[in-house]
Amino acid sequence: MSADVEGYRDYVAARLDQLRRTAYLLCGNWHTADDLVSTALVKLLRHWHRVSAMENPDAYVRRVLLRAWLDERRRPWRRENSWESVPDRPADQAGPDGVADRLTLLALLAELPPKRRAVLVLRYFCDLSVEETARELGCAEGTVKSQTARAIAALRARLAAQAVVTEEALSNG
Amino acid sequence: MDDLARMMRAAVDEPPPTRIDLHRLISGEQRRRRTLTWASLGTGIAAAVAAILVVPAVLAAPGPAEDNLSFGAPTSTATTPGTPSPSPTLCPIPSPSGPQPPVQSYGTQRFRPTEPPEQAVVRLTMELRRALRDELPPLVEAEGRMYSGCPHPQFEFSSRGDYVTLLRVVRYDVAAYLQIRLMPTPADDDRGCHAADDKDACTFMYQADESCQAAEECTFTIPPENGTTASVYEESLKGGPRRVSVLVRRPDGTSVLLSLRTEPGALVSGGQTEAAGKELPMDDGALFVLGTYPGLTLYP
């Protein structure tokens, strides 16, 4: 058991940072991200003996993390109200450190349906292929492709709309 | 979409320090495994003892068992024909201190649960322990704090006809008291918070708990799902403690009231007690999950 725990500890130490970042992109909140990762890590520990023998334990952990987040989202009191539009944010308020850009990205991601957001995070942050993403989400590859295309189209539309708002704000200001 | 990948990486390039304590997570899980092992062992022994005691009595019984349960009788009379054999891990159940209230005082059009209280206590206690085992969030542990001093999670039957239990729940250094009360849903429930958002309407729920004052804040009502509705209340009490209550109304006519509150001295840090804080070891979502556990019903 102790050898198992040491292996688990080493594994988690190497992946914790990446798992937290992935969870944050999914839920948009570091506090919730830590809770989701905790949930995933507890489940991982319970099945560590089996998971450690897997070819790709990372995929298992990501699946548990995704499921924890989707379960959390399904709870009725967690349903977020989508914003009708991204908050107006003129470019001169962006600041030098790109904080506004990050907030914009998170707001845009938050507008997407959970599975679409998960598809984007897995594909563009975790660098998974369409096939791997489909396997982790338990859906067809075609679904991943269509969800990706729709999510990107939605992001483009939102970004374009925001650019117009920013230009108007600058010209008025 | 290289831009998207770049923006995502930029959005998470400065994560705050994590709250995850890996050492505590591992030790908590090891403790849970030990508890489960002992509980399984205890249950196995209890089942064997019960079988040894009950089987001869059943074989010797001349005919159908007579239902001779008396109201409030202690369930330790396990060999009585017609009664379920309670697990020896149950604490002695105190008799209700007064007569059963008249049906009219319930304000309910539903039938009073017909299950004898001493049987219901055993059944509900088993369901409660299963719910705590299966549905508590990770790293949250619960122990019994029944009013009569039982160290295990266990329901008791109150003289008002409700079933109530008091638990202590802990997550990391944060501890709180959780009261779970099962009662028939009042017939005039429509004046409750699920029908109105104003906080005055929320006071109705505290008719179920005379020690409570009217809610200072009424947060929101969970929309019905599968016939189940729930109201969530959050309030700050005098002296600093905080309470979150969830009232779940199940479609079978059972209302489950779960009140989680910090208590002065309930926070433990390094073996020291501290003043009450605002943090609670569970959130309203976890309370809702417990309240909707299938077995926690007065109408099995």
Image (tube, coloured by chain):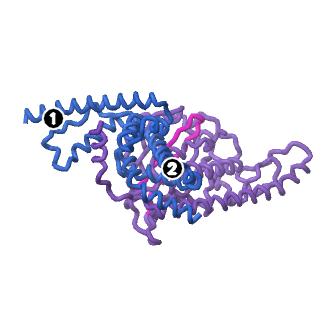
Chain colours: A blue, B purple
Query: Does the image show residue B197?
Result: no
Quadrant housing the N terminus of chain A: bottom right
- Residue type at the position of mark 2: Pro
Query: Does the image show residue B213?
Result: yes
Magenta stretch secondary structure, dominant: strand
| A53 in relation to B196, above or below | below
Q: Residue at left 48%, top 41%? A: A71
Q: Secondary structure at mark 2?
A: helix
| B284 in relation to A145, above or below | below
| A138 in relation to B262, above or below | above
Q: Distance between the Cα atoms at labels 2 and 1?
A: 44 Å
Q: Secondary structure at mark 1?
A: helix
State how many labels appear.
Answer: 2
In the picture, the disc for residue B262 is none
Q: Nearer the viewer, residue A14 or B209?
A: A14
Q: Is residue B262 magenta?
A: yes
The reply, left or right, for residue B232 in relation to residue B292 is left
Residue A66: image x %, image y %? 46, 43
Residue B96: image x %, image y %? 65, 54
Q: Nearer the viewer, residue B73 or A140?
A: A140
Q: Quadrant of residue A90?
A: top left
Question: According to the image, label 1 marks what residue?
Answer: A166
Question: According to the image, label 2 marks what residue?
Answer: A57
Query: Is disc 1 on the same chain as disc 2?
Result: yes
Residue B279: image x %, image y %? 40, 57
